[in-house]
Amino acid sequence: MTEKIAVCPGTFDPIHNGHLEIVKRALGTFDRIIIALGLNPEKETIFTVEERMDMIQHSIEDLDGRVECDYFDGLLVRYAERKGAHAIIRGLRAVSDFEYEFQLALMNRKLSRNIETFFLMTAHRYLYVSSRIIKATVVAGGSPKDLVPEYVLAQLKKKFPGIR
């Protein structure tokens, strides 16, 4: 029997509990999930690739080795093919997410008929959570406690000492 592998891509600047909730739920369908950090030079990030990989690694320690992290550059579907994955997992919060993600899914389907996109609706408690909102909150001195894993919170406090 073939192992069912899925890729969960993103910038993860930083990874938050909404991301992790989607990954944990996807483990009910897939044998292994690769959290794939996309390298996008057009996006300004507050954390380096190494720092984001470190935060992801610490955030998935309790997932029985079924989740790993990696990074990629270039087309997501080509990366997924190289990793032996047949699925891309995307979390949705709102209709606006769907419109954008639907376009990406259709383009990915055009590029590779072997890769399917699975959309999972985020849990209600994370509907408003995004890395962008977390960054805006910490820049203004607020705390994202309960929205990010403890290790990520500690890393945010190092970058933004004003967080309580």
Image (cartoon, rainbow, N blue to C red):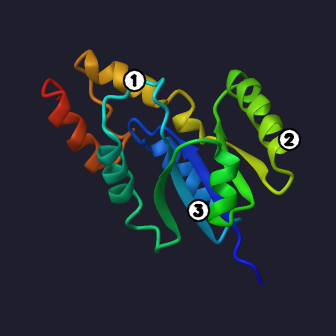
Task: Give the mark nearest the N terminus, 1 or 2.
Answer: 1
Task: Determine which residue is flagged by label 2.
Answer: 110
Of residue 142 and residue 100, the one placed in the foreground of this image is: 100
Of residue 98 and residue 18, the one placed in the foreground of this image is: 98
What percent of the width, then of the height, locates residue 54? Answer: 31, 53
Q: Secondary structure at mark 3?
A: strand
- The kind of residue tagged 2 is Lys
What percent of the width, then of the height, locates residue 163? Answer: 19, 27
Q: Residue furthest left?
A: 161
Task: Give the mark nearest the N terminus, 2 or 3.
Answer: 3
| Figure check: 142 above or below 48 | above
Residue plotted at (70% across, 49% down): 77
Residue 5 relative to residue 141: left or right? right
Of residue 38 and residue 55, the one placed in the foreground of this image is: 38
What percent of the width, then of the height, locates residue 136? Answer: 36, 19
Task: Determine which residue is flagged by label 3.
Answer: 33
Task: Determine which residue is flagged by label 1.
Answer: 44
Of residue 125 and residue 82, the one placed in the foreground of this image is: 82
Task: Give the mark nearest the N terminus, 3 or 1.
Answer: 3
